[in-house]
Image (cartoon, rainbow, N blue to C red):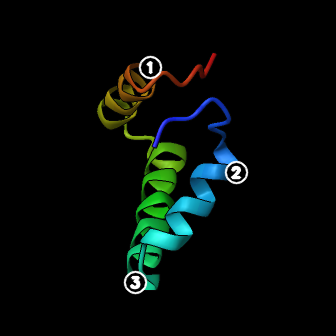
Amino acid sequence: MATANDSVHGRIEQARGELTPMQMALGGVLVVALGFALLFVQDPMVHDSLHNFRHAAGVTCH
C-alpha cells in the first residue's frame, strides 16, 4: 500500500474503490457531527475537554 507517490489524492481514490456508499455516508455523518460538537459546544467544561481533544489530535487552534 505505501508507495513513494502516496498522496491524499491517491488515498481518496483507494477509499472510493474499497468503501461502500453506506460506509462513505456514515463517515460523512460522523465528520459533520464531530465538526458541530467541536465548533458550537460552548459549555465551559465541555469546551475545555474538546479544546484538549483538539490539541491531542494535533489541531492547532490558537
Q: Amino acid at mark 3?
A: Met
Residue 9 numbered tag: 2
Residue at the spot of label 3: 22
Q: How far apart are labels 1 and 3 at the CA level? A: 30 Å
Instruction: Identify the residue at image location x=47%, y=83%.
Output: 21
Tell me residue 27's x, y (percent): 42, 66
Residue 55 numbered tag: 1
Instruction: Identify the residue at image location x=54%, y=60%.
Output: 14
Element marked by disc 1: helix
Which is in the foreground here, disc 2 or disc 1? 2
Vertical placement of residue 56 versus 12, above or below: above
Vertical placement of residue 58 versus 24, above or below: above
- 15 displayed left or right of 44: right
Instruction: Identify the residue at image location x=51%, y=63%.
Output: 15
- Check contact, mark 3 vs mark 2: CB within 8 A: no
Q: Which quadrant of the view contains residue 13? A: bottom right
Tell me residue 36's x, y (percent): 50, 56
